[in-house]
Amino acid sequence: MKAIGVIPARFASTRFPGKVLAELNGRPLIQHVYEEALKASSLQDLLVATDEEKVVKAVEDFGGQAVLTAKEHRSGTDRLREVVNSIDAKIVVNIQADEPMIHFSMIDRLVNCLSEDPHVPMATLIHRIEDVHELDNPNVVKVVKDKSNFALYFSRSLIPHSHLPVFISRSLFLYKHLGIYAYTKDFLFTFTNLPVRELERAEQLEQLRALENGYKIKVIETDINTIGVDTPEDLERVRQRMQQDEANARS
């Protein structure tokens, strides 16, 4: 199946305006994401979808592809839909522009999941929580899944509740959601036409729209832990992590 990767890149982020062009180790943030995603063997094409001319120029300056979209889109998924409407593809991967520590294998696993099972309309990644500080952080989205690895629920709150200290209970694993998605192109258009319901509004989590309307999301566990950049402080955390990884690689 032909798969395309799209990186929605809204310039006017509420908490960190212009973050997609923020400098990270000598390159704009979006370049780190693009160059890693470009390594994914499962993608036949990759482009950035943005609402700002300066982002288009920055992407083209480092040799990437970018398209200008409407400014009024409510979400990156709506921006995705505009871009892929005229593109011949069966699978669309929504790659977050603020995840500079993404690994290309994460993309390949999602595409392979949808390629191998035509009954799965949408898939995403999860990672086992290892840092106790993430448990009460509403920016770290938690997820619970069923025995077949389909999502039951996503929340900014800690789920599931445990009467035992969660890092003492060996039988209870807590997972966080990593914000990268793969959809069949058909389901992407279905998804963007679904009504927004109460749970999505309450949690401000777009993926709940699929669950509330009766559709399933396959979740795939990865041992790769990324850091999403929502604030300048997050960007500094990523910078420090990259420096540490480089130091470890040299030693």
Image (cartoon, grey):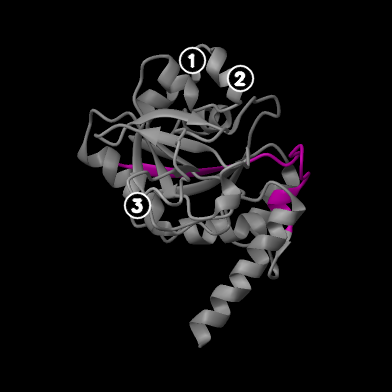
Instruction: State the mark number for residue 117.
Output: none
Q: Quadrant of residue 186?
A: top left
Read off the residue under disc 2: 202
Please give the range of residues in magenta.
Answer: 1-22
Q: Which mark is residue 108?
A: 3
Q: Position of residue 150 (x, y in %)?
A: 32, 32
Check disc 3 and give the amino acid type: Asp
Q: Nearer the viewer, residue 200 or 103?
A: 200
Label whose residue precedes the other's in the sequence (1 or 2): 1
Disc 1 target residue: 193
x and y, in percent, of residue 230 in the image: 68, 46
- Residue at 57 percent across and 32 percent down: it is 157
Q: Is residue 19 magenta?
A: yes
Residue nearest the viewer, comparing 169 with 126: 169
Question: Can residue 67 be spotted in the picture?
Answer: yes
Q: Secondary structure at mark 2?
A: helix
